[in-house]
Structure formats: structure tokens, C-alpha cells
């Protein structure tokens, strides 16, 4: 295996990054660590791409192709509760989405691929990306605007995300949509205030809000094909002044998830029309603000075929899992996947002896991925890069 020599180094990088987490757009220390490793191995390094983004170019024996490998670097505004000895030293910030492991594994792949650079049938561009958690802005669009996919042109991209639903040793991928689009929704409902005993003299914004919330669910059941997927979730509702006063204002906030860009693009109009129609039919009015976030993540079928073969070659058939359904969580690697053929695979990171229901999931303050998954991640990257560069 390619990773053996570097595993203890990768674990110490990961623990160092884990104990010094940085929020989106503040990844200064983490990006400097990545850049210094890339420089020490003689790669061509560029800093400050789309914020704290860093790239390292490893030139192979020819320039026929360039494959990009991407890791994200940012942490979340959470208070860590893992009790690990290398837990976050920054109050209120935690690597709860495993981006510390992504950065460390990619550095492991840098080490392993550097050793065989003279045999590589093309180039590898390592991409360390900031601000993945900053929906709807993200970190990928800034790097793309700053030219990360050019000079030399990146032909295809790979990424990994640790995935606690699956055991260590499994690599999970599917063709087509693998993760959803994630948009945000803000609705203000206006009515007219009155005494609670005299509803006829007012326009009840709370009652209108209840009808709006119900009607929004009918968009999913009646306006989206039953063979497609969409979710509208209202996560907050704020309104009212006192138990016996009819309120004139209710504010709702929510999220909209879809799996296809065509469905995503229809949602603003469907939601606005429904919410306004309901509010006006009851004598009130309503403002809708729809903020488009990350697009759906669509994996390239050719890359899935190639990478599946690489996984089987490395670890056998049992390691490869093709999930039946996509997930509606969002991932800003989707912006890269819109520009080039791309594949994000999930990496099982739950010890086999711990049941799913007893293991903390992503964005949980107790999330503690199994470090034994690193070898799988690094070897996956290395083998898939070799196999991709060797196809004609
Ligand atoms: Zn996350
Ligand atoms: Zn993540």
C-alpha cells in the first residue's frame, strides 16, 4: 500500500489541525500548514486563491492530463464535546464535519504521489479549499474565479468526505446526483393587529402563517414529480406579542433541498406564488426572499466506473458500496462538478464494533471519526490518480 510510510505523520497533522480549528474564511493556519508541506516536497505552490485557498502542482513525466484532488479545511461554530486529548483548543469552534481529516489525508496523498512523480502519466493539482461550510457563498466559487481549474487545465476532479453512516474500510459512490442542492428561504407575513377577542377587526398573521406552511408542503407533493425529490423545511417561526393580541407580523425561515438543477430552478417561483397567494386570499400580504445556495452534486459516471475499479483492485469487492439513494445534504464540491467531470466519494469512518445509532454523525459536537479510515482514503486517492492518468 502507498500510505504506510506516511500514516503516523498524517495522524499527527490531523490531530494538530483538529486542535486548532478555524472557521470558514479564517483558515490561515491550516492553509499555511498545507502550503508548507507542499513546498517542502518541491511542488509548485500558490496561496490566497479565493481566500485562504492553496494549490500545489505536482508535475508528472508528461503534461498530457491534469487531475485535481480537493480537500476542504474549515471548521464549524460548535463547542467540542468529544473528550479527545487533541480536542479543539478554540472555544466555540470544532472540526465536526471531518475537514481536518480531509486536509490531512490529502497531504498524505501528496507525500505518496510525490514519491512516484517520475512515473505519473500526467500532473496532479492538490486543491486545499476554504469556506465549504459557508452556504450559500461557499469556497469553491472563489477558487474557480481565481483560476484554480486553469494553468494547467484540470481535466477531472476527485474528493472524499468522511461518512459516519458507514464502517471504516468502505468507500461509497454513485453515478449522477449524490447530494442535494441547498437553498435558503425567508418569508415575512404581514397582517393587521387587533384585540384577540375581535379577529374581524384585524388580519391574523399567525393564522396566515399556518396556512402558508401547510401549502408549502403541497408544492413537494403536487408540483414536483413523485420520481424526483424535494424537501421544504420551515425551521424557525417568529411572531406575536401577547396571548390576547392578534399579531401583524410573522417571520419564517427555512431550507429547500432538491436533487436536480431543473427542479431547484423552479422552486423560487413555486414558493413565492404559493405563499403570496395564500396570504392575499386571507387579506394579508407576504414577502419572500429566496437565496440560492449550493447546486446538486452530480458525479460523473465515467469517473465512478474508473474509481470503482480502483477500489476493487485495492481492497476487494466488499469495500465498494453503491448507495441506492442520494442524500439531501449539500456540498460545495458541487461547484467544481459543474465545471469538470468530478467525483466525490464517501469514506466510511465508523469503527465496525460501534452501532450506527451509538455513533455521532457529522455536525455533532461528539463527532470523532475513526483514524483507521485514513489509509483507505489515501490509497484510494493514489490508486485512482494512477489509473486515471493511465487511461488514454
Ligand atoms: Zn459540513
Ligand atoms: Zn463537510
Image (cartoon, rainbow, N blue to C red):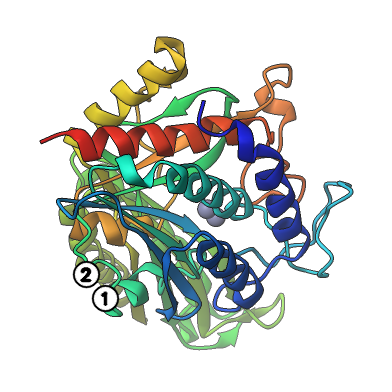
- In the image, 136: left or right of 390? right
Q: How many marks?
A: 2
Q: Residue furthest left?
A: 392
Query: Looking at the image, is 193 positioned above or below residue 216?
Result: below
Q: Position of residue 203 (x, y in %)?
A: 45, 81
Residue 223 located left or right of residue 16: left
Classed neighbour count for the residue bearing mark 1: other residues with Cα under 10 Å, few (<14), some (14–19), many (≥20): some
Position in image of residue 296 (x %, y %): 29, 52
91 lies above or below 85:
below
Circle 1 sits in a helix, a strand or a loop, which is it? loop
Q: What residue is disc 2 on?
A: 150
Query: Along the line of sight, which residue is nearer the eye, 342 or 387?
Result: 387
Q: Is residue 139 left or right of residue 229?
A: right
Dots 2 and 1: beta carbons under 8 Å? Answer: yes
Q: Which mark is residue 331?
A: none
- Residue at 73% from the left image edge and 16% from the top image edge: 353
Work out whether 63 lies above or below 306: below
Which residue sits at x=55%, y=40%? 162
Q: Nearer the viewer, residue 195 or 269?
A: 269
Picture quarter containing residue 195?
Answer: bottom right
Give whichever of 259, 246 is nearer the camera.
259
The residue shown at (65%, 28%) is 350
Q: Which mark is residue 147?
A: 1
Give the percent coordinates (x, y) of residue 228: 22, 39
Query: What's the CA distance linking mark 2 and mark 1?
Result: 5 Å
Residue at position x 23%, y 48% in the image? 122
Rendered location of residue 279, percent (x, y):
34, 74
Amino acid at each position: 500500500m502507498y500510505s504506510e510510510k506516511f500514516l503516523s505523520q498524517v495522524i499527527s497533522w490531523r490531530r494538530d489541525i483538529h486542535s486548532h480549528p478555524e472557521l470558514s474564511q479564517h483558515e490561515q493556519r491550516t492553509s499555511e500548514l498545507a502550503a508548507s508541506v507542499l513546498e517542502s516536497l518541491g511542488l509548485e505552490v500558490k496561496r490566497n486563491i479565493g481566500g485562504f485557498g492553496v494549490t500545489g502542482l505536482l508535475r508528472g513525466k508528461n503534461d498530457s492530463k491534469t487531475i485535481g484532488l480537493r480537500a476542504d479545511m474549515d471548521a464549524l461554530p460548535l463547542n467540542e464535546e468529544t473528550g479527545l486529548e487533541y480536542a479543539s483548543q478554540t472555544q466555540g469552534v470544532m472540526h465536526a464535519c471531518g475537514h481536518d481529516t480531509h486536509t490531512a489525508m490529502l497531504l498524505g496523498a501528496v507525500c505518496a504521489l510525490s514519491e512516484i512523480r517520475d512515473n505519473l502519466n500526467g500532473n496532479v493539482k492538490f486543491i486545499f479549499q476554504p469556506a465549504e461550510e459557508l452556504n450559500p457563498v461557499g469556497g469553491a466559487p472563489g477558487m474557480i474565479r481565481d483560476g484554480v481549474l486553469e494553468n494547467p487545465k484540470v481535466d477531472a476532479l476527485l474528493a472524499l468526505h468522511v461518512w459516519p453512516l458507514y464502517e471504516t474500510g468502505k468507500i461509497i459512490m454513485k453515478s449522477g446526483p449524490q447530494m442535494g442542492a441547498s437553498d435558503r428561504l425567508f418569508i415575512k407575513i404581514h397582517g393587521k393587529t387587533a384585540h384577540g377577542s375581535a379577529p374581524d377587526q384585524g388580519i391574523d398573521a399567525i393564522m396566515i402563517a399556518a396556512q402558508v406552511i401547510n401549502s408549502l408542503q403541497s408544492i413537494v407533493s403536487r408540483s414536483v414529480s413523485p420520481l424526483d425529490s424535494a424537501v421544504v423545511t420551515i425551521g424557525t417561526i417568529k411572531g406575536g406579542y401577547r396571548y390576547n393580541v392578534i399579531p401583524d407580523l410573522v417571520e419564517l425561515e427555512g431550507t429547500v433541498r432538491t436533487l436536480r438543477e431543473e427542479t431547484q430552478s423552479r422552486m423560487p417561483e413555486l414558493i413565492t406564488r404559493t405563499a403570496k397567494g395564500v396570504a392575499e386570499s386571507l387579506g394579508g400580504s407576504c414577502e419572500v426572499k429566496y437565496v440560492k445556495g449550493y447546486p446538486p452534486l452530480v458525479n460523473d459516471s465515467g469517473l465512478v466506473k474508473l474509481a470503482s475499479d480502483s477500489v476493487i483492485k485495492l481492497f476487494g469487492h466488499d469495500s465498494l458500496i453503491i448507495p441506492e439513494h442520494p442524500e439531501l445534504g449539500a456540498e460545495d464540491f458541487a461547484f467544481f462538478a459543474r465545471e469538470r467531470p468530478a467525483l466525490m466519494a464517501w469514506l466510511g469512518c465508523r469503527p465496525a464494533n460501534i452501532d450506527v445509532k451509538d455513533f455521532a454523525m457529522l455536525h455533532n459536537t461528539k463527532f470523532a471519526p475513526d483514524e483507521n479510515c485514513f489509509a483507505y482514503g489515501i490509497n484510494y486517492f493514489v490508486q485512482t490518480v494512477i489509473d486515471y492518468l493511465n487511461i488514454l
